Amino acid sequence: MRTGFSEAWRTERGIALHGNDAAREEAVEDLLERRDRALAKLPVQQQ
């Protein structure tokens, strides 16, 4: 099971590596949606 942090990191890495050179725009949109879902799973840190 992936944690929200590792999933968010993986999607950010994919966007950084392939974002502007992606073969399909839908692939980038999918990565962005996955990232947003993963970030929503992370607990909110209070300072």
Image (cartoon, rainbow, N blue to C red):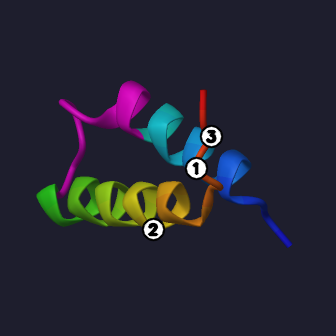
Q: Please tell me in which quadrant of the rendered image residue 46 appears.
A: top right
The residue depicted at 39 percent of the width and 26 percent of the height is 16
Dividing the picture into quarters, in which one does residue 37 lie? bottom left
Q: Earlier along the polypeptide chain: callout 2 or callout 3?
A: 2
- Residue 14 x, y percent position in the rendering: 46, 40
Outermost residue toward the front in this view: 47
Give, as a three-letter code, the residue at label 1. Val
> In the image shown, does 41 or 12 lie closer to the viewer?
41
Task: Name the disc covering residue 45, or none.
Answer: 3
Give the residues in magenta.
15-24
Look at mark 1 in the image and give the residue it sits on: 44
Instruction: Residue 6: give x, y in percent of width and height.
Output: 72, 47
Closer to viewer: mark 2 or mark 3: 3
Q: Are marks 1 and 3 in contact (CB under 8 Å)?
A: yes
Q: Residue at x 21, y 49 (%)?
A: 23
Q: CA distance from mark 2 to mark 1?
A: 14 Å
